[in-house]
Amino acid sequence: MGCVRVCVLKSGTEMVTGKRLVKRKRRVPNTRTREMDRSSPAAAFFRGVQSFISCTSLCNDHGVLECYEGLYVFILSLYHLRSNMRFDIITIFPGMFDSYINESIIKRAREKKLVDIHVHDLRSFTEDKHNKVDDRPFGGGPGMVLKAEPLARAIGSIPKKKKHIIVLFSAGGELFDAPRTRAWIKKYDQVIMIAGRYEGVDERIKKIFKIQEISIGPYVLTGGELPAMVVMDALSRHIPGVLGKEESLEEMRYGVGLPAYTRPEVFEYKRKKYRIPEELLSGNHALIEEWRKKRGTKK
């Protein structure tokens, strides 16, 4: 059986192929890549193709059959070639999203052009001088109902991709869970979310647009803004490149709720010592893998 060698690109001027040390040719700066936005899908794809072709050429020259880095970058670039995930949120409190979309992982995902987030102020779609978005319900009763007119204008104004879904958050809607998350990220590239308030929305809006009612749990919230953030977060983390490494999706291997430990090895609190499980300190990868599988909740 033939021997398989691995080619791994380094950041310097040399690379290792098996036991050979090969000088890399000095690359001529590529003006095309420089002129493009380096975080754009086109630039990502172009860099991926360059990496794959370069590494494949070196592998062929030296009899190397596999080149992990070039292949990985190329496959990831194919994903970037597809349109990014777009989120549209219709709300009367757009300021609630400012800190969320401009911090941490979601902020980096936006900078990489992996997600595209648009927050629409429902009040800007009203036509009266008071920017009224709600009114009393017919038949009487407590509370107010979001009016159909501004909602219809808001939804109608949003550019829609071919694979989109319109969501209304409702305590009586279908549960948004892990299987639904995985299904949506494969099926849609745009999620339009209506963050309802008060006693709900005018029922007639559901007859104008194909709307799916979704709930994030068996409880009632004061509005749909928090559910919208939950859906954005759950979907975004399944997009390659958002978390940095696909391995960060621990639930894909072991399920949710996997126990995790970090330093120090022995933690003492109120004279009682708490230690790390011996399996995690063994250095035996097979044993660690077995320990995690036993404690995972993958379904």
Image (tube, rainbow, N blue to C red):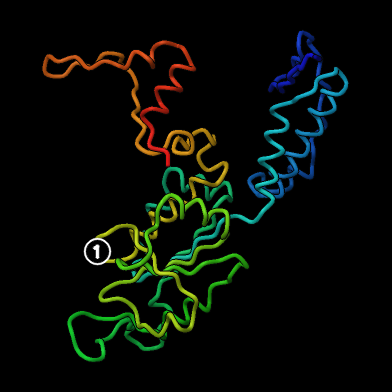
Where residue 91 sits, quadrant-wise, is bottom left
Which residue is situated farthest in the top direction here? 19
Which residue was labeled with disc 1? 220
Tell me which residue sits at (57%, 54%) in the image: 186
Where residue 26 sits, quadrant-wise, is top right
The kind of residue on which mark 1 rests is Val
The x and y percentages for residue 122 are: 40, 75
The x and y percentages for residue 277 are: 32, 17
The x and y percentages for residue 75 are: 69, 39
> How crowded is the residue under tag 1: few (<14 C-alpha within 10 Å), some, or many (20+)?
few
Q: Using the image, determine if residue 80 lies above or below residue 122.
A: above
Which residue is situated farthest in the left direction here? 270
Depth check: give the residue in front, 241 or 102.
241
Q: Using the image, determine if residue 271 lies above or below residue 107.
A: above
Tell me which residue sits at (35%, 59%) in the image: 227
Tell me which residue sits at (33%, 80%) in the image: 146
Which residue is situated farthest in the bottom direction here? 139
Where residue 95 sits, quadrant-wise, is bottom left
Judge from the rendering whether residue 170 lies leftward or rightward of residue 289; answer left or right.
left
Quarter that holds the C terminus = top left
The x and y percentages for residue 237 are: 48, 45
Quarter that holds the N terminus = top right
